[in-house]
Image: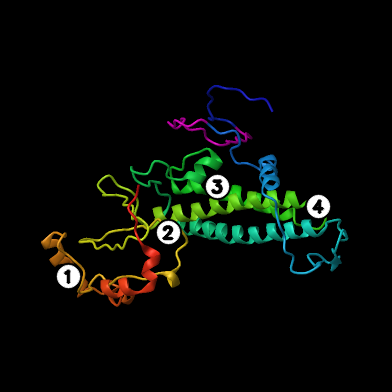
Amino acid sequence: MASKEGSFSIEDMKNVQINIGAVVKEADEWDQEMGPFPKPGVATLRDWDFKICNRYKIMYSPADDTCTLCTYGPCDLTGDKKGACGINMAAACGKIVLVAVLMGTCAHTAHGRHLYHWCLDKFGDMPFDMGSEILVDAPLYRTILGKKPKTLKDFGPVLNYVEEQVAQLLACTHTGQEGSYLDFESKALHAGMLDSLGKEVSDLIQIVAYDMPVSAEEDYSEWIWVPPGFAHGNTFTEDTVIEYLCSGEYSPGNEAGISPIADDLDWSLCDPELASLFQQIAHNTELMTDKDRNGFSLASWTADPRSENFLYDELN
């Protein structure tokens, strides 16, 4: 269909249909060049996925020796046998991996889709702003789509993209559509990327729509490194958001603590007014957990054999 540029008047026009596609806005000021693969498809990163899968060998532990994923089954896949659709045991395991990843992706993205419609109906379109102190406010959105979200409605096309890709991936699990375990694993990696994107969209929508905390210039933010084996605690004189970044997985059953109100703690290095304020708060607040309130005294912790596992050595 031929197209012409210029202006025209619709006055006195009859039997004319006008179709307007996407409205191109003024280019955003962004110092990042467009990446090579915005909105990657199912096979876009296949070669890279294969490099990863061939470098880090995949090991399967099938629950049984048969495949029952379609009505042709059950099919015996022991040894070098193949099922009615042509897949072997490795491919059947790869298909199960892809299906499992897609279940999580669908659950998380469906949550984002529900939030998207709910928030638009309840609040209308809203500006997307995570504050001035966050350098990359939507890292997966920007990396995968090559765009910057400006309003709540900008998350609609992202959800469309994820849902389209999920439909294509799920189609690959139909009988006879795919026969290579490497291709199933490649698609599982693609689904994992989509899952992370869907979860990010859900988080960002609720942060904006429900006015959850974002960065602001007047906020005070500081990171404090606590060396391994260093007993530590904190208290705040005003409402504060604190975030822990741990060097390992948090395991509540393997932790112990010294009570911040233990009688044998030395407060001589603390500012007297702050120490007094802490004592007032500590003995009256309901925010202190029973674990902290009833924790070890310094002496009893030192005498406990487990304390030997938490020695702080001077750093070289």
Tell me which numbered mark, 4 or 2, is placed earlier along the sequence: 2
The x, y position of residue 128, in whole percent, is 41, 46
Q: CA distance from mark 1 to mark 4?
A: 67 Å
Disc 1 vs disc 4: which is toward the camera?
1
Looking at the picture, tell me which residue is in the foreground, 232 or 89: 232
Given the image, on which type of amino acid does mark 2 rest? Answer: Lys
Q: Is residue 263 above or below residue 102?
A: below
Residue holding disc 3:
158
Tell me which numbered mark, 3 or 4, is placed earlier along the sequence: 3
**Residue drawn at (48%, 44%), measured in percent from left and top?**
139
Mark number displayed over residue 279? 1
Q: CA distance from mark 4 to mark 2?
A: 46 Å
Q: Give the residues drawn in magenta, as a range.
A: 14-33
Estimate how packed mark 2 is, as few (under 14), some (14 to 19) or many (20 or more) residues with alpha carbons within 10 Å: few
Given the image, on which type of amino acid does mark 1 rest? Answer: Gln
Asked if residue 224 lies left or right of residue 268, the reply is right
Residue holding disc 4:
179
Disc 4 vs disc 2: which is toward the camera?
4
Residue holding disc 2:
122
Disc 3 vs disc 4: which is toward the camera?
4
**Residue drawn at (58%, 62%), measured in percent from left and top?**
107
